[in-house]
Amino acid sequence: MRMLHFLMVAMAVLLGPAFGWAEDEPGQDVEKEHQLGEVVVSTTRTEIPVFDATQSVTVLTSEEIMSSPFERVEDIIRQVPGIYNFRHYALQTNGIVSPLKMRGVGNNRVLILVDGVPQNDNFNNAIAWVAWGHIPKETIERIEIVRGPTSALYGSEGLGGVI
């Protein structure tokens, strides 16, 4: 019995590679290789329609902002899905700072821009507070919220998103 088992294993080892032997020349029905064209992937800060954006984008117009029952910008932004902010009361800011989180990413990795100027107060790169009370609701033309990583455009502060 042992000898029979040994012979079966030996035959399998010797004959096994014969089934995996490849064809020397390709057959007649093999198509020629095709060279694909060059693919360029780029990102830009130029205006594009919201429907053409590759990320999750929410745009709040001035009509939506003014018709909102909230007076503070932080409360308006809090109503957008995927954003969590909470109010801190501090003496130096009269209680108008509010760090936020976007899609679970902390406030030091969410970039807030007003007319292209960063508003985050990143001291020690630990806490990024925005003085929302300094932004009157009446002066806002629109609020654009881009969720997800935008660090290719805005650096490491845009890892969670950009407002």
Image: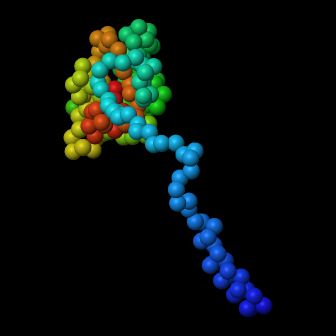
Q: Could you tell whether 3 is left or right of 119 in the image?
A: right
Q: Position of residue 61 (x, y in %)?
A: 39, 12
Quarter of the rendering occupied by the N terminus:
bottom right
Q: Is residue 151 above or below residue 7?
A: above
Quarter of the rendering occupied by the C terminus:
top left
* Rendered image coloring scheme: rainbow
Location of residue 40 (image quadrant): top left
* Residue 97 appears anywhere in the view: no
At x 24%, y 28%, the residue is 119
Q: Position of residue 83 (x, y in %)?
A: 43, 31
Q: Position of residue 56 (x, y in %)?
A: 44, 28
Total tally of numbered discs in the picture: 0
Q: Is residue 136 above or below residue 126?
A: above
At x 65%, y 83%, the residue is 10
Residue furthest to the right in view is 1
Location of residue 33 (image quadrant): top left
Q: Could you tell whether 57 is left or right of 21 in the image?
A: left
Q: Could you tell whether 106 is left or right of 22 in the image?
A: left
